[in-house]
């Protein structure tokens, strides 16, 4: 599986596509387990860190930004940081977690992050509107509505491989538009 496929899976995971999450796990779990095991040096602890890491990936896939770097870097960073957090907690004996006055920052995006996300969403929709009619509709169907390639191929009355080509080229055009 190449890096573009992994990016595509992360994008689908951001839309809460369980099948894509399963495929992402199958494609990346061996590498991420190696990272966790190297940090924790304990198989059981590494397995727990892996579980926490994939929960974080599921919850935060929408935050992944394709920037030309390897998507594995993002996944490895999550796993490494999760493993380091577990290592620190184990060394401290969980002392910090139950201390009175210990407060967590508010969950969710800040007002600034919300404004940026809204702006990016508007740009994304504008870029989708620039695509040829069928191509934009196919991308919306695949990545916003969760339709399978086969369903889209049937809807647009094209062969399955043609639909895959449409989606791949559409994503390339979308990436170019978003980078302007």
Image: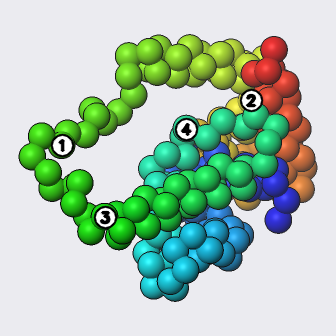
Q: CA distance from mark 1 to mark 3?
A: 15 Å
Which residue is depicted at the point 52% across and 74% down?
Answer: 40
Q: Is residue 148 above or below residue 138?
A: below
Q: CA distance from mark 4 to mark 3?
A: 30 Å
Q: Earlier in the sequence, mark 4 or mark 1?
A: 4
Query: Does residue 47 appear in the picture of this structure?
Result: no
Q: Position of residue 151 (x, y in %)?
A: 68, 54
Identify which residue, 103 or 52, lies in the foreground.
Answer: 103
Q: Secondary structure at mark 1?
A: loop
Residue at 61% from the left image edge and 40% from the top image edge: 64
Q: Give how far across and how far down residue 1 sits, in percent.
A: 82, 65
Q: Callout 4: 10 Å neighbours few (<14), some, many (20+)?
A: few
Q: Secondary structure at mark 2?
A: helix
Q: CA distance from mark 1 to mark 2?
A: 48 Å
Instruction: Give the CA separation, mark 4 to mark 2.
Output: 22 Å
Sooner in the amino-acid sequence: mark 4 or mark 3: 4
Q: Which residue is mark 1?
A: 102
Tag nearer the camera, 1 or 2: 1
Q: Earlier in the sequence, mark 1 or mark 2?
A: 1
Are there few (<14), some (14-19), or many (20+) residues within 10 Å of tag 3?
few
Q: Name the residue: 72% across, 24% down.
A: 128
Q: In front: 42, or 10?
A: 42
Instruction: Describe the element under mark 3 as helix, strand or loop.
Output: helix
């Amino acid at each position: 599986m190449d890096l573009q496929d992994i990016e595509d899976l992360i994008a689908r995971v951001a839309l809460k596509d369980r099948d894509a999450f399963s495929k992402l796990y199958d494609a990346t779990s061996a590498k991420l387990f190696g990272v966790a095991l190297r940090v924790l040096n304990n198989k059981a602890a590494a397995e727990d860190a892996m579980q926490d890491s994939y929960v974080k990936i599921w919850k935060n896939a929408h935050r992944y930004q394709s920037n030309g770097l390897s998507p594995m870097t993002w996944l490895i960073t999550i796993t490494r940081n999760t493993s380091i957090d577990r290592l620190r907690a184990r060394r401290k004996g969980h002392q910090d977690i139950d201390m009175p006055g210990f407060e967590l920052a508010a969950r969710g995006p800040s007002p600034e992050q919300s404004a940026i996300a809204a702006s990016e969403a508007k740009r994304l929709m504008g870029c989708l509107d620039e695509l040829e009619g069928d191509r934009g509709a196919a991308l919306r169907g695949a990545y916003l509505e969760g339709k399978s390639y086969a369903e889209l191929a049937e809807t647009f009355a094209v062969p399955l491989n043609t639909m895959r080509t449409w989606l791949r080229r559409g994503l390339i055009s979308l990436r170019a538009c978003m980078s302007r």
